[in-house]
Image (cartoon, rainbow, N blue to C red):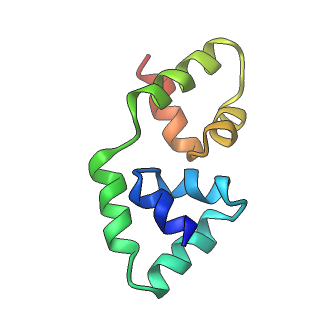
Amino acid sequence: TPLIEDLDKGMGIPQVAKKHKQKCNSLYRHLRTHGLLDRYKLKQMAGGYPPEIRARARTLSRQGKTVREIAQELGVGKSTVHLWVRSQ
């Protein structure tokens, strides 16, 4: 499926959910139902997000965007954005 193809390309679960206009919870449930959650969750945790995404979050923060706006734009969690912005 296109979801799995995007995950195989290295996109994170939140990014794939946003791209396909789904909620993260729905995608997690789909992966869990088909026995794929551990594979992609571990892959996401091991690889993390690309440095370009983190840099973009910091740039958007300096431009005055809120954490919520940044998270929505990049397709990542708000707590992730908090960590990235705090580590500037």
Residue at the extreme top of the image, as rendered: 62
Please identify the quarter of the rendering in which residue 58 is found: top right
Q: Residue visible at 30% across and 46% down?
A: 47
Q: Position of residue 34 (x, y in %)?
A: 45, 86
* Nearer to us in this view, 81 or 53: 53
Q: Residue visible at 56% across and 50% down?
A: 15
Say how many tags the image has: 0
Q: Position of residue 57 (x, y in %)?
A: 56, 26
Q: Residue visible at 58% across and 16% down?
A: 59
Looking at the rendered image, the quarter that the N terminus falls into is bottom right
* Nearer to us in this view, 16 or 84: 16
Q: Residue visible at 54% across and 35% down?
A: 81
Please identify the quarter of the rendering in which residue 8 is found: bottom left
* Nearer to us in this view, 3 or 48: 3
Check the image and report above or below for 37 versus 15. Answer: below
Q: Position of residue 79 (x, y in %)?
A: 53, 43
Q: Position of residue 82 (x, y in %)?
A: 53, 33
Looking at the rendered image, the quarter that the C terminus falls into is top left
